[in-house]
Amino acid sequence: DSGVTQTPKHLITATGQRVTLRCSPRSGDLSVYWYQQSLDQGLQFLIQYYNGEERAKGNILERFSAQQFPDLHSELNLSSLELGDSALYFCASSVVREGPNEQFFGPGTRLTVL
Amino acid sequence: GENVEQHPSTLSVQEGDSAVIKCTYSDSASNYFPWYKQELGKRPQLIIDIRSNVGEKKDQRIAVTLNKTAKHFSLHITETQPEDSAVYFCAVGENTGFQKLVFGTGTRLLVSP
């Protein structure tokens, strides 16, 4: 167990709908990262937050948005869902201090869009 | 931005053999190189990492080597076991204030008994 929690574990929805994925980082970690992993694909970085502020953006679609709250949990909002959005969505957290930091991954949310 | 290439995409070995997975990167300023193991449907788990000031690091049957001049690093697994079967991802940490990781495309390792 990495200490990072994600809910829900599974989500099945229809095209055009909107969903929210939730992530709670490890205790003490200020930075949260979101990744998308499509079937048999690698991990695509979506977005990073640090202490409530957006810090880096990757290949995140305009239909997707995220935020990090004062208690440091983060939510990833996916709207106008398409079949191609079906994927595993992981969040990771890290302690951000000087130098490279290990990222700890949560168990993921499996999104299925029908 | 950083570009990471990983080879091979699949690797089949017999139990007890060694396995080597290689990654190359493009940004010479990158300074963190972790390797993750991911079993089917599970989260990626860090198995070993190396920082740019070190050329080699070993942890039991797993080792990572880094050649900063050539901008490539490799994962070495010795005495492979069936439980080593998984997808392995290399990643590169960009040398920015709040690092994000750029991942390779993954190597599916199959260890046959």
Image: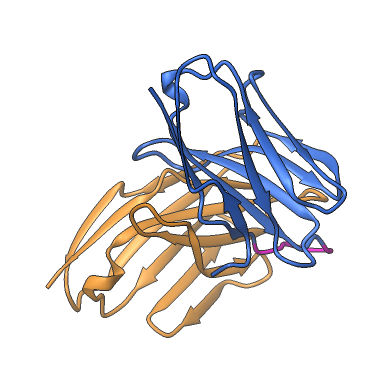
Chain colours: A blue, B orange
Up-down relation of residue B5 to residue A72 (above or below)? above
Looking at the picture, how far across and down is residue A79, in whole percent? 61, 20
Looking at the image, which residue sits at the far left? B113
Image quarter of residue A101: bottom right
The residue closer to the viewer here, A99 or A60, is A60
Which residue shows up at 48% across the image and 82% down it?
B59
Q: Main secondary structure of the magenta part?
A: loop
Which residue shows up at 42% across the image and 65% down it?
B75
The residue closer to the viewer here, B8 or A44, is A44
Residue B57 left/right relative to B60: right
The residue closer to the viewer here, B59 or A47, is A47
Asked if residue A44 lies in the magenta stretch, the reply is no
Write the start and end of the magenta stretch as one range.
Answer: A97-102
Residue A57 left/right relative to B25: right
Looking at the picture, how far across and down is residue A40, in whole percent? 34, 40
State the quadrant of the N terminus of chain B.
Answer: top right
Up-down relation of residue A21 to residue A18 (above or below)? below
